[in-house]
Image: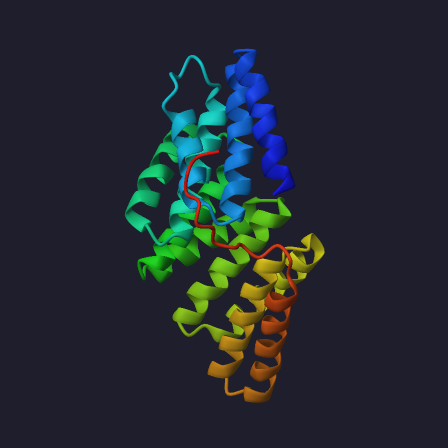
Amino acid sequence: MRARELFKQSMLTQQSLDNLPATAMTAINLSYVSHKLGDEGAALLLLDDVLSQGNAQIPSELRIAAAFRKGIILADSGKAAEAELALQLADQSCNKRCTFTAGINNLSARLALAKGNFEAALSTAKNVISATGEKEELANAQRIAAAAESALNQNETALKNYSAALDLDKELALSARIYEDLTGIASVLEKLGRKSEADDFARRAVTVKAASRMWPVKTENKSPP
């Protein structure tokens, strides 16, 4: 919440200076914080404002970042069709040559997974795993690959990918992702008939979720910052 207030102040300052690129950058950062606080409406309004600006006024990289972030928020909200449109905008602007390539590909794999296209999700996630050195996106790709492999009954490989993602997420201290990894491992172990181990990982997942201070909390106020 403190970060949200600081970003609001920064954005007001940049707006008063008529610095559109800096205003857009701050709006994207503020949208991230708003999303983390559970205020999806405010986050999307900020990103739509960036995307509504003319191409000449906002650098391409910031427009890609805004579209990519919008896709993530919509995917988190279960709005797959809208997320797909945001993903297409980011992907077309990036054209595989921007700093968000790995993230965009992961979002594509995640949406394929949500649609039940497990083979496509797995193929795309594997491409990210082989190409990226970014730890967070690598962990995301490993988690997506594991979920797809589990759905395809490739459970031993799924367990390896979930475990690899867990190691990276622990290193990055990403509590929400650690919870997803532990839950995924528990599910795969259950399918493999290793119930006592599955129960242990499930308990660990509950403990992580309960202990995390950064878990998103839904707010009632949906007005923009």
**78 relative to 191, above or below:** above
Residue 147 spot, x, y in % from top left? 46, 65
Query: What residue is drawn where x is 68% and y is 55%?
Result: 173
Query: What residue is drawn where x is 44% and y is 38%?
Result: 42
**142 relative to 193, above or below:** above
For residue 78, which quarter of the picture?
bottom left
Residue 104 spot, x, y in % from top left? 45, 41
User: Quick check: can you spot residue 96?
Assistant: no
Taking the image as shown, residue 39 lies to the left or right of residue 196, namely left
Question: How many badges with numbers are in the image?
Answer: 0
User: Quick check: can you spot residue 206?
Assistant: yes
Taking the image as shown, residue 79 lies to the left or right of residue 76, namely left
Query: What residue is drawn where x is 52% and y is 17%?
Result: 15
Query: What residue is drawn where x is 56% and y is 30%?
Result: 8
Q: Nearer the viewer, residue 177 or 129?
A: 177
Looking at the rendered image, the quarter that the N terminus falls into is top right
**Residue closest to the far front:** 221
Residue 88 spot, x, y in % from top left? 34, 37
Taking the image as shown, residue 67 lies to the left or right of residue 80, namely right
Residue 106 spot, x, y in % from top left? 46, 48
